[in-house]
Image: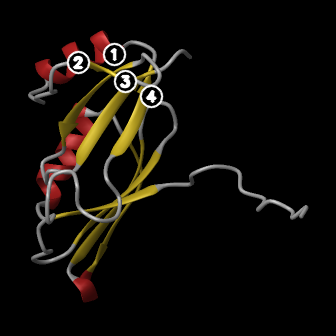
Amino acid sequence: MSEERLPLAGVHHVALITADYPRARRFYLEVLDAEILHETYREARDSHKLDLRLPGGTRLELFSFPSPPPRPSYPEACGLRHLALATPDLDACVTRLEARGADPEPIRVDEGTGARFTFFSDPDGTPIELYEAAS
């Protein structure tokens, strides 16, 4: 059976919810070098929305809401497991992240691909993976 594939071009953005907007905003700007695309405060919802672009072009939407429920488990909650970012130089990323106060796990090797990777978390405990991939 020959069926046409969906005409998708890629991931447009990833949306995250934070419990502490100023802390998360600082983390994504100062630790992950994100660029602000647009920032809005929605008074009716007591909610911030921050559109960001990470180095490499990945777009994030960062939302704040009063008293969001905590993440049920790390990282094996049902749903989105983690955000994975590609890098051609994992060692340089780890060095810079540590200098900026992040705490990456020891570097591991993907058994399936042989690529190196590590994890660290944003201030809300969202797992972020750095995956070394040839550019």
Give the number of the mark in front: 2 or 4. 2
Q: Are marks 4 and 1 in contact (CB under 8 Å)?
A: no
Closer to us: 109 or 10: 109
- Sort mark 3 into few (<14), some (14-19) or many (20+) by Cα contacts within 10 Å: few
Residue closest to the far right = 2
What label sits on residue 110 in the rendered view? Answer: 3
Closer to us: 120 or 65: 120
Amino acid type for the residue under numbered disc 4 = Ala
Q: What is the quadrant of residue 28 in the picture?
A: top left
Q: What is the quadrant of residue 5 in the picture?
A: bottom right
Residue carrying label 4: 86
Residue 11 in the image, given as x and y percentages of width and height: 57, 51
Which quarter of the rendered picture does the N terminus lie within? Answer: bottom right
Residue carrying label 1: 90
Amino acid type for the residue under numbered disc 1 = Leu
Q: CA distance from mark 2 to mark 3?
A: 10 Å
Q: CA distance from mark 3 to mark 4?
A: 14 Å
Residue at 41% from the left image edge and 38% from the top image edge: 54
Residue 89 in the image, given as x and y percentages of width and height: 39, 12
Give the number of the mark in front: 3 or 4. 3
Residue carrying label 2: 107
What label sits on residue 41 in the rendered view? Answer: none
Q: Are marks 2 and 1 in contact (CB under 8 Å)?
A: yes
**Is residue 56 found left or right of 110 in the rendered image?**
right
Residue at 14% from the left image edge and 50% from the top image edge: 125
Q: How many marks?
A: 4
- Sort mark 1 into few (<14), some (14-19) or many (20+) by Cα contacts within 10 Å: some
